[in-house]
Amino acid sequence: MIHRLNPGRLRRSAVACLAVLAVLAGAGACTGGEESPTRPDGPGGPGRVGGTLHILAGSELRDLGGILDDFQRESGVEVTLEYTGTLDAVDRIAGGRADADAAWLASDRYLHLALDDAKTVVARATTMMSPVVVGVRPELARRFGWVGNSSVTWADVAEKVAVGELTYAMTNPAASNSGFSALTGIAAALAGTADALTVDDIRPDALTSFFSGQVLTAGSSAWLTDAFVRSTTPVGAVINYESEILALNADRLRSTPLTIIYPRDGIITADYPLQLLRADHRAAYDALVSWLRTPDIQRRLATETHRRPATPGVRIDPAPWPTGPLPAELPFPATRAVADQLLTAYLGRFRRPAHAIFVLDVSPSMEGERLALLRSTLAGLAGADDSLAGRFTRFRERERVTLITFSGVVHRTQEFTVTDPSPGSRDLAAITAAADGLTLGSGTAIYTALNAAYRYASDAVGDDPSHLTSIVLMTDGENNQGETADAFRAAYRALPDTARAVRTFSVVFGDAQVDEMRAIADETGGAMFDARSSSLSEAFREIRGYQ
């Protein structure tokens, strides 16, 4: 199998009218595409089919590499996975710019709300399943009386958050399907509705209270679990796929596994639909679907990924997940407008506000096209990017934005607070103007600038701990002036826990040193993004899922 990274993306989100029985049966009703045939009782081999299958895939599917390699060897089908975020995938598919034969995301709920033409998806097949659940630290679960308690509801979780007894990690709903599923499910559960969610069902006060407990966010489910374990400040729970929490319990938290809560009032399940977009690739698509849904491969998927079988009647012994029926599926928003409004309200009002600190290289090597790209990238985040992904990654209401520029020395620090996130507003225009006014200096003092950013962040977190604070470091070169990497590490490790909890997301651009930038991200618990194989704007947009 060939893995093609569509610019270092790690993300994201969002099946209209998919009932529980339809999910369990792997049915394709309400999708606009026919359900692909399967061979549940076949010998397991796809036969020699040949051809190619280029798939837009969610980052969750990185763990299928070995399984897809085996399929490719047996079938002769060259499978290429291009990892992308759901919103980007929706943008491309709905706009006729997919440039792919198939799509394979954790869920197609949002996609089918966005599609005007039901014929866009030629065929659809559920491949595996994983509900979004709550993993709670065992000491808290015991104190709350939640161990072995199947009556816990989302309202019970909300109550513990409201009184300050529970904090949690959850992915950004605009960047990851697990977060999107959690947001829509929680909104429906707290509204107490069994029907498709409408604008009138949304309870802003209850949701604001619930999301006040979110102290860690991320653009991918896998990264979230890693950050949850590594966090320098305690986090009480994580809202994520059942499969991610089971994998975490089996590996890094084996001695103190999280207690998994399946809220009695309902859940939302990812069913990983493989969708055919080009009819002329039907043979390769059918071969892959049939192979994936054979009992042997379904059992292998369960063993290797902790996801539940989609093929009826497949039994796993021993099963990696708890026995017993799952709670009912919670309703999904009735229209795209409702889903978009819920996402917008989450980003701008329900969740804790962000404080994004950008540390930007303006050394001589940035002259010309590189500086122009940096300016246009910041302008995109300030509202100039009107793509679907751009609308949900622009600077948000209540957000603090800080620009720190450097070359051989730190130049200036500019601070902004977004009160009006609409394109063209005074707040966003001020950020665009600051980007347009960036000027070059001489030399490159990466660690001097990063140390200055952490001193600034330490003061900011101390003055106002309510914001989710992060640093974005962008450079196109290597450190040649000022402090050394060792000096930075010593200074960083001497910071208080609250300041060390501020993560740095490094962006490799131009001639930046990959090892240097990766080491910074690893030291601070962040992540590195490579803008050389994509674009600077795409890297910054992806980072927004982590802020």
Image (cartoon, rainbow, N blue to C red):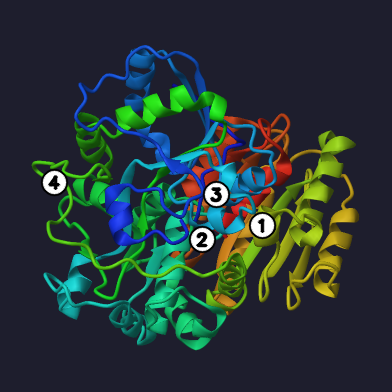
What x and y, as percent, mark residue 19? 35, 61
Disc 1 marks which amino acid? Ala
> Which one is earlier in the sequence, the residue at label 4 or at label 3?
3
Foreground: 240 or 484? 240
Horizontal side of residue 140 vs 517, given as left or right:
left
- Mark toward the viewer: 2 or 3: 3
Residue that mark 1 sits on:
452
x 52%, y 60%: residue? 502
Q: Quadrant of residue 520?
A: top right
Query: Which residue is identified by label 2?
Result: 172
Q: CA distance from mark 1 to mark 2?
A: 28 Å
Total marks placed: 4
Residue for badge 4: 319
In the rendered image, which quarter contains the N terminus? top left
Q: Earlier in the sequence, mark 2 or mark 4?
A: 2
Tell me the amino acid under the disc marked 3: Thr
